[in-house]
Amino acid sequence: MFSVRTNPSILRVALQMVALLGASAIAGAVAFHIHPRPPELYLLQEAPDAGEVTMAQVLALEKTTGVLWIDARVRQQYDLEHIPGALLLNPQEFDAMAFDYMDTFQTNAKPIVIYCDAQKCAASKTIMERMEQTGLAMDNEIHVLRGGWNAWKSSQSNQP
């Protein structure tokens, strides 16, 4: 039979490799969390869900046809800052505000892009569904911006 001897120096090297890999992983995680501008997780390349568009797709639409922006965030966030020209239409105030925008939606020929404040924000999808159910979208394309407000802000900071 074979007798396997464990060489102490090989075992020591293997343990050192595991320790270095662990220390590297911990250092990377700490740097990600304390960095003043960590990369946004929505920048990961996942396929958009049905009805979602990426910021690159929206920028292409803006160059060709323009877009009508709908902000689905709460009023306080909208009042602090929003995409120029965006209309506020959130789930909390949908019934009261939809009527005010009726003329705008009837004369609009641009694709509609809805955004909220997170990568997977349900408010944008809720507004998209309500607009489709009530007929507010008319015959316009209607999309949800993947990455929401943060995606738009990042696209603005990356422009010259």
Image (tube, rainbow, N blue to C red):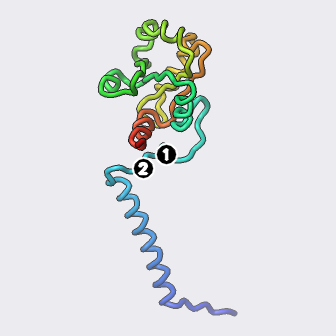
Q: At x 47% / y 74%, what residue is drawn?
A: 18
Characterize the local packing of mark 2: few (<14), some (14-19) or many (20 or more) Cα atoms within 10 angstroms: few
Q: Which residue is mark 1?
A: 43
Q: Residue at x 44, y 14 (%)?
A: 94
Q: Is residue 148 above or below residue 71?
A: below
Image quadrant in which you'd find residue 73: top left
Tell me residue 130's x, y (percent): 53, 16
**Helix or strand or loop: what does disc 1 sit on?**
helix
Looking at the rendered image, the quarter that the C terminus falls into is top left
Across and down, in percent, residue 159 comes to 42, 41
Residue 110, relative to residue 13: is it above or below?
above
Judge from the rendering whether residue 6 lies leftward or rightward of residue 39; answer left or right: right
Residue located 43% across and 18% down the image:
89
- Residue 17 place in picture, x, y as percent: 47, 77
The image quadrant that residue 140 belongs to is: top right
Q: Is residue 143 left or right of residue 90?
A: right
According to the picture, the residue beneath numbered tag 2 turns out to be: 39
Q: Residues within 10 Å of mark 1 (few under 14, many from 20)?
A: few
Counting from the top left corner in percent of width and height, residue 121 is at: 46, 31
Cβ–Cβ under 8 Å for marks 2 and 1: yes
Q: Looking at the image, which residue is at 49% across and 45% down?
A: 43
